[in-house]
Image (cartoon, grey):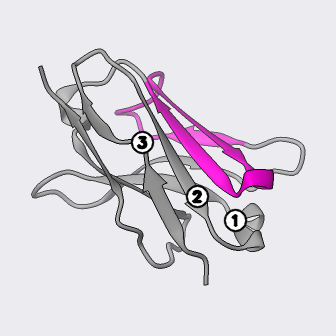
Amino acid sequence: QVQLVESGGGLVQPGGSLRLSCTASGSIFSIYTMGWYRQAPGKARELVATITSGGRSNYADYADSVKGRFTISRDNAKNTMYLQMNKLKPEDTAVYYCNGVPAPGSWGQGTQVTVAS
């Protein structure tokens, strides 16, 4: 079973940037389409970015709410996925998780992102 560990969250002012990392145990990470999810207080968990498993090209897709501001990437050799978040807004405040798409496995602890002045 793949275990996922998210990191890189923190407190940032509106307009700022953060880079999240997701490290997976196990070599099968490279075969999965992966995604970043987030869950804000009192709201359902939502998928904000996905990236295919690759070959020579990885295809990314984004929720409308983050399109143009967030960039998802992965390094299969390192079993790691990233989420570069720019121009952060208060509504981006949430716990961010990584997992497979469309069938998530076990959830990690996530990493808290708080956008506030």
In this view, the residue farthest toward the right is: 56
- Give the alpha-carbon distance from disc 1 to disc 2, as whole Å: 13 Å
Q: What span is colored magenta in the figure?
A: 59-85
Q: Amino acid at mark 1?
A: Tyr
Q: Residue furthest bottom?
A: 1
Mark-to-mark CA distance, 2 and 3: 11 Å
Q: Nearer the viewer, mark 1 or mark 2?
A: 2
Residue positioned 61% across, 64% down in the render: 24
Inspect the magenta stretch and tell me whether residue 30 lies in it: no
- The crowding category of the residue bearing disc 3, from other C-alpha atoms within 10 Å (few below 14, some 14 to 19, many at least 20), is some
Q: Mark 1 or 2 closer to N-term?
A: 2
As helix, strand or loop, the secondary structure at mark 1 comes to loop
Identify the residue at image location x=88%, y=51%: 55
Q: Mark 2 falls on what kind of element?
A: strand
Residue 18 percent location from the top left of the image: 40, 29
Label 2 sits on what residue type?
A: Thr
Write down the residue under mark 2. 23
Label disc, if present, on residue 8 of the rendered structure: 3
Per the rendering, the mark at residue 32 is 1
Q: Nearer the viewer, residue 19 or 57?
A: 19
Expressed as whole percent of the image width and height from the top left, the position of residue 90 reads: 18, 29
Q: Nearer the viewer, residue 25 or 106?
A: 25
